[in-house]
Amino acid sequence: MRIRSVLYGVTLLGAVCTPLSFAVAQTAPTCGQTGTCPQIKSDNTAYGTTAAEFLLLPPTARGAALGGSFAALTTDLSAVYYNPAGLSQMDRPGVMASTMNYVADTRYAFGAVGFPFGGGAHAVGISVSNFGFSNQPVYTVEDPNGASGQVYSVSETAIALSLSQQFSDRFSAGISGKFISDQLGNVSGSAFALDFGTSFHATIGGRPIRASFVIQNLGTTLSHSGIGLDAQVIRTSSDTLPQEPASATLKTKDWSLPIMFRVGIAYDLFQTSAGRFSLMGEFTQPNNTNPGFNFGGEYAVGLGSSGFSLAGRAGMTYWPDENTKADTSAATGAGFASGLTNQMVRWSAGGGLHYGRAGSFGFGVDYAYRSMGLLGGVNMFTLELNW
């Protein structure tokens, strides 16, 4: 009797499972005769998930001309951005200011002041950077031509305080704290972030070599609020009585900051009393795109005993997310540079004139040109004074 019950149970289970297995077989994907299903490739790169992208713009013409591969070489006020560890290698106080007309009629500006103290073992710096545009017409669905005369502006600002210290004759470290403000028309947001950098400097073959590790923009998320998010919701009802619109406030997403990890190295291929030639490279890992790298070279030569020196620079930047494929003829007709589509390598170049004598003031003027692919190119100028 027990064996017969088991047989009846197996038969019933088979009767139930057969149509279920048939249904599964009907809905399961076809994997071919080999039984191996094709793997669907997925890309988890966090494109478009960060805000305050202006934090990644190069603030000085020298760094821009070198393709951004400047973290290991910087020993002046530009260190407040590229690597705060280099700030303590300043030999005297100074101020620096830069300006750049960016793409689509936007503008970027940067200013910094720094002071070494403690016999040159420590340094402090303050910097301000701003990106944006102003007085642009407001276009809406109801007013696609902007005939209302309303305008809006965008202003993104970062204020940073940097501290740096020399721990030995070969190693220094630094940290920067930033307050970030994002003003988008009638909506604004704010965030806080930290930069941390280290600098190792030694000699190989009697010539300087420098290495750096930097983390940028590690901080809070950026959320927005303001009257621009206020809205009126039209309520519908089956009643015959009219319904007044309800006031509501749109809730925005919290945006991450563009975090960047940078590992760089710089080496003087030759150095004499008259001049030097330095090569540098840098690996970058952002949190909103794929890894990239930069290369640069700088040749600086003194003009006799006049106190003046000249520098020539060139750089290359690899943009891993530049995969635009566009018709070059259409791009030229739209005012873009021809023949620059789908190129992941961008070139930059520039130079500078500097003056300085021991015990007196000094100044410098630098220029850089950066290729922006389909968007053309941008020019940048930097002025530096020290005493």
Image: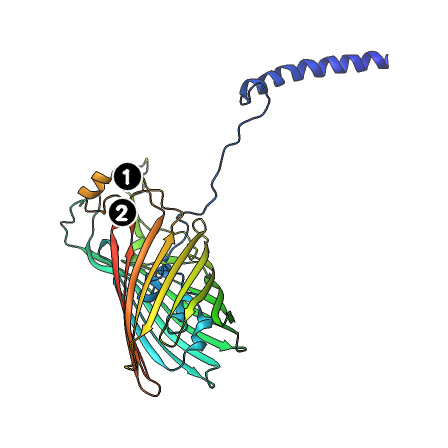
Pick the front one: 121 or 312: 312
**Image side of residue 244 versus residue 135, left or right:** right
* Amino acid type, residue under disc 1 in the picture: Ala
- Residue 102 visible somewhere in the drawing: no
**Image side of residue 327 versus residue 288, left or right:** left
Q: Which residue is drawn at 44% across and 71% down?
A: 84
Residue 288 position (above or below residue 314): above
Q: Position of residue 326 (x, y in %)?
A: 28, 39
Which residue does the numbered mark 2 point to in the structure image? 374
Mark 1 to mark 2: distance in Å? 9 Å
> Do tag 1 and tag 2 residues touch (Cβ < 8 Å)?
yes
* N-term-proximal mark, 1 vs 2: 1
- How many residues crowd mark 1 within 10 Å: few (<14), some (14–19), many (20+)? few
Q: Is mark 2 on a helix, strand or loop?
A: helix
Pick the front one: 294 or 78: 294
Q: Name the outermost residue toward the bottom.
A: 359
Residue 190 position (above or below residue 141): below
Q: Which residue is drawn at 53% across and 28% down?
A: 38
Q: How many marks?
A: 2
Q: In which quarter of the image is the N terminus?
A: top right
Q: In which quarter of the image is the C terminus?
A: bottom left
Residue 234 position (above or below residue 260): above
Quarter holding residue 315? bottom left
- Residue 123 visible somewhere in the drawing: yes
Q: Is mark 1 on a helix, strand or loop?
A: loop
Which residue does the numbered mark 1 point to in the structure image? 326
Q: Position of residue 353 (x, y in %)?
A: 27, 72
- How many residues crowd mark 2 within 10 Å: few (<14), some (14–19), many (20+)? many
Quarter holding residue 273? bottom left
Quarter holding residue 56? bottom left
Q: Position of residue 43 (x, y in %)?
A: 47, 41
